[in-house]
Image: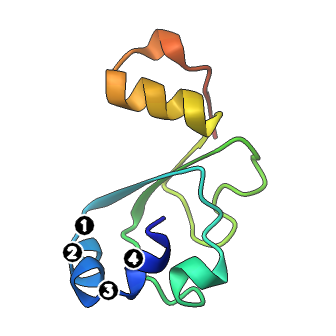
Amino acid sequence: CLGPLYNDAEIRAFQSKSDVVLAIGTRFQGQTTANWQMQVPERLVHVDIDPDEIGRNYPAALGIRADARRESAWTFSGSLARASVEVQ
């Protein structure tokens, strides 16, 4: 989630043109989404350790239950061996 950066017009414009959003360890709370006014594309990949949070505030095209720290290491290294994930 972009947090307070979402209040920046350039960030909103960039994000609104995205084809997909990868959200790792975010809860999409009101303060960080302009009270849920933030627009996200239909292709939202939501990664969270708590399966109840995946898709809670924004529908996820793909939900992955995983630890954010380990998932981030996997995402940026490209190694499946580093993360234990459960696709929902």
User: Disc 1 marks which amino acid?
Assistant: Ser
Where is mark 1, residue-wise?
Answer: 18
- Image quadrant for the C terminus? top right
User: Disc 4 marks which amino acid?
Assistant: Leu
- The answer to whether residue 11 is above or below residue 49 is below
**Tag 3 near tag 4, CB within 8 Å:** yes
Where is mark 2, residue-wise?
Answer: 14
Which residue is more in the foreground, 59 or 71? Answer: 71
Residue depicted at x 28% and y 73%: 15
| Mark 2 or mark 3: whose residue is earlier in sequence | 3
Where is mark 4, residue-wise?
Answer: 5
**Tag 1 near tag 2, CB within 8 Å:** yes
- Would you say residue 12 is visible in this rendering? yes
| Mark 1 or mark 3: whose residue is earlier in sequence | 3
Q: Picture coordinates of residue 75 (x, y %)?
A: 39, 31
User: Disc 2 marks which amino acid?
Assistant: Phe
| Mark 1 or mark 4: whose residue is earlier in sequence | 4
User: Which element is circle 2 on?
Assistant: helix
User: Which element is circle 4 on?
Assistant: helix
C-alpha separation, residue under disc 2 versus residue under disc 3 = 10 Å
